[in-house]
Amino acid sequence: MEKDTYHHGDLKNALINAGIEILSQEGLHGLSLRNAAQKAGVSHSAPYSHFKDKQALIAAISTKGLYLIYEKLSQIAEQKEEQPLEQLHEVAWGYTEFALENIGLFKLIFSSAIEREHEYPEFVTISHRNFDLIVKVIENSQDAGIIKPHQSKLKALTIWSMVHGFIFLYLERQVPSQILKKYKIRQLLNNVVDQFIAVNDK
C-alpha cells in the first residue's frame, strides 16, 4: 500500500494504539513518532498531521490510558455502590489490576514524561475526573460510617497515595521477597486499604 495515505480508519487512534503497543514491548525508550508510524504501517511523516512532536503523542497516549482507567474504575464503583466497603476494596484492586496488565502505559501516565501538562487540557480534565471518582468512593464510605466524615479530598489523596505507592513498589520489585512468598498481591493490597480504614474510622 502507499504509505503516504492511511486506509484503515482513524490514523490518530491507530498511532496511539501503536504507541501503547510499543510501550508494552519496549518501554518508554522505544516510543517515538517514527516507531509509532512504522508500527501503524504509515510513512514517517504521517504522524505530524496529528501530533506536532513526541510530547503530543505521549500526552495523547497518557490521556487514553486515563480514560481506560476511568472506564474500568467507574464501572466497578457503580456495581458496588450499595456496598461501600467492598466498593473501596474493589476500586483499589481494579486500579492495581490495570497497572499489572498495562505496566508500560501505567508508568508513562504517572511519569514526568509530559513536560507541560497545561498544554494538553484533555489530559488535565480526565486526570481530575479520575481523582473525583476516588473522592466519590471515599464519600460513599463516609456516608456509610466506615470512615470519618469531612476532608474527603484529603482522604482520597491519602488512599490513592497508599495504593499507588504500593503498586510502584511491587512493579519495581521492591516488596521484600519474604513477604511475597507469604502473601498474594491481592492480600497485600487489601491490607493497605484496611490500614487506611483503620486510621480513618470513627
Image (cartoon, rainbow, N blue to C red):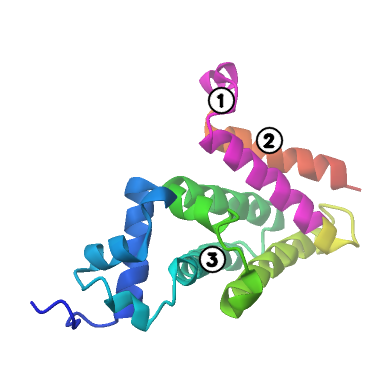
Residue type, mark 3 in image: Leu
Distance, label 1 to label 3, CA atoms, is 29 Å
Residue type, mark 2 in image: Asn
Contact between marks 2 and 1 (CB within 8 A): the answer is: yes
Residue 110 seen anywhere in this rendered image of the structure: yes
Distance, label 2 to label 1, CA atoms, is 10 Å
- Residue occupying the point 30% across, 64% down: 34
Pointer 1 or 3: first along the chain = 3
Q: Residue furthest top?
A: 178
**Main secondary structure type of the part rendered in magenta:** helix
Seen from the viewer's position, the closer of residues 135 and 194 is: 135
**Residue 7 image label:** none
**SS under mark 3:** helix
Q: Which residues are magenta?
A: 155-182
Magenta residue check for 63: no
**Quadrant of the drawing holding the N terminus:** bottom left
Residue 102 seen anywhere in this rendered image of the structure: no
Q: Which residue is mark 3?
A: 66
Does residue 130 sit above or below 92 in this rendering?
Answer: below
**Residue 183 image label:** 1
Contact between marks 2 and 3 (CB within 8 A): the answer is: no
Mark 1 or 3, which is nearer the eye?
3
